[in-house]
């Protein structure tokens, strides 16, 4: 059976711990040759800087080849829906795309944001599921409605600073942004930190900014399984109080999904959710991070971004190491099997 990396929900904590251990080794010994002669196709339906750079460079550092494709730009546009009459812009169906690429490369990765029209449809994550259904090689999620590679980089960063993470307080705080953004990173932050047994607090302005019920319920269940707590609050001071790690992200309000004008009216009063020095002073000398890109003095102040406790750049670097570990794992070539006895 082909092993994919679509969501960390499909991977056990032990398996994820293994990836993180390998990533730690690769951070110290980055140049390897374990994937010599192997390749990955990177399908970007949306823009990228960190994801593209880290996957391309990561595959190169492992001795392999990465091929970047941008459907609709330097590659044919792709249709992902089954049974459609293809008389629109798309030139190829995912069935043929996946079949052809599977005959060329050893892995396929895709970045495909939701359409921001109907959350009941987008929440099904049909695009990457269609690729995985037709691919004969492992598929990696480079961000859809979740961002599992970012999750790995986040947890690697958290563990580096907190060491033992179980029942340490993790705060995921909503922040203002001029437009509604994807909930993927926020969904993923809940999935990963709860899977590792942290005491998770979700801070958002009001009930409109709650994340999808699936991710809330999963976080609640995973925290409970570890004897940890899961808290949702709209109280800024209570949320920051004694936090060990603060993670900021902006996302759109799901009740107004597909209606950015209405959503904008609801988000405008909440610019005070910005992460600043006064809020960080309430924590237990917490580290601060963000997945990047980040609008300074909108999501977080210069004071926070330039502080010693800001580890956002470290998290970004860790994307490289965790993705290399992931590619090795999917090719059944973990560091442990490569080290001499």
Image: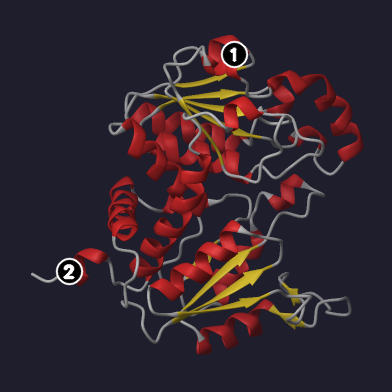
Q: Position of residue 326 (x, y in %)?
A: 39, 62
Q: Residues within 10 Å of mark 1 (few under 14, many from 20)?
A: few
Residue at 35%, 31% in the rendered image:
197
Label 1: state its secondary structure: helix
Quarter of the figure with the N terminus = bottom left
Q: Where in the figure is residue 37, as x and y percent of width and height?
A: 39, 87
User: Measured along the vertical axis of the image, is residue 40 above or below residue 192?
Assistant: below
Tell me the quarter of the picture where residue 250 sits.
top right
Residue under the image location 71 percent in, 72 percent down: 82
The one of 266 and 221 positioned closer to us in this rendering:
266
Can you tell which quarter of the image residue 94 is in?
Answer: bottom right
Q: Position of residue 310 (x, y in %)?
A: 51, 33
Q: Closest to the observer: 190 or 149?
A: 149
Of residues 220 and 35, which is closer to you in this image? 35
Q: What residue is shown at x 30% (from left), y 49% (from top)?
A: 17
Q: Residue at x 69, y 31 (%)?
A: 299
Q: Which mark is residue 278?
A: 1
Binning the other alpha carbons within 10 Å of mark 2 as few (below 14), some (14 to 19) or many (20 upward) gives: few
Residue 332 visible to an observer of this rendering: yes
The residue that disc 2 covers is 339
| Residue 92 pos. (x, y %) | 74, 82
Which of these two is toward me, 327 or 2? 327
Indicate whether 284 appears above or below 318: above
User: Residues under labels 2 and 1: Cα distance?
Assistant: 47 Å
Give the mark nearest the N terminus, 2 or 1: 1
Q: Element type at marker 2?
A: loop
**Quarter containing the C terminus:** bottom left
Q: In the picture provided, is 264 more to the left or to the right than 68?
A: right
């Amino acid at each position: 059976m082909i092993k994919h990396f679509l969501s960390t929900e499909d991977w056990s904590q032990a398996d994820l711990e293994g990836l993180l251990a390998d990533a730690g080794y690769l951070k110290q010994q980055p140049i390897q040759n374990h994937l010599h002669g192997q390749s990955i196709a990177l399908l970007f339906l949306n823009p990228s800087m960190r994801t593209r750079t880290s996957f391309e460079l990561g595959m190169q550092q492992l001795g392999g080849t990465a091929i970047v494709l941008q459907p609709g730009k330097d590659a044919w546009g792709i249709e992902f829906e089954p049974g459609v009459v293809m008389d629109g812009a798309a030139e190829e169906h995912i069935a043929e795309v996946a079949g052809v690429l599977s005959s060329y490369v050893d892995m396929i990765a895709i970045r495909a944001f939701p359409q921001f029209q109907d959350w009941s449809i987008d929440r099904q994550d049909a695009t990457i599921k269609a690729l995985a259904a037709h691919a004969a090689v492992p598929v990696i999620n480079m961000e859809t409605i979740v961002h599992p590679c970012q999750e790995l980089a986040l947890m690697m960063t958290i563990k580096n600073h907190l060491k033992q993470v179980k029942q340490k307080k993790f705060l995921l705080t909503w922040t203002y942004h001029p437009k509604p953004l994807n909930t993927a990173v926020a969904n993923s932050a809940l999935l990963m930190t709860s899977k590792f047994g942290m005491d998770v607090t979700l801070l958002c302005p009001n009930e409109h900014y709650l994340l999808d019920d699936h991710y809330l319920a999963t976080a609640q269940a995973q925290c409970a399984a570890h004897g940890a707590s899961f808290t949702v609050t709209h109280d800024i001071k209570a949320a920051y109080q004694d936090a060990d790690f603060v993670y900021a992200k902006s996302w759109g309000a799901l009740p107004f999904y597909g209606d950015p004008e209405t959503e904008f009216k609801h988000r405008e009063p909440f610019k005070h959710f910005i992460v600043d020095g006064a809020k960080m002073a309430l924590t237990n000398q917490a580290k601060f991070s963000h997945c990047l890109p980040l609008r300074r003095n909108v999501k977080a102040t210069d004071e926070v971004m330039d502080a010693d406790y800001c580890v956002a750049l470290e998290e970004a670097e860790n994307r490289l190491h965790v993705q290399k570990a992931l590619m090795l794992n999917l090719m059944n070539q973990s560091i442990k099997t490569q080290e001499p006895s």
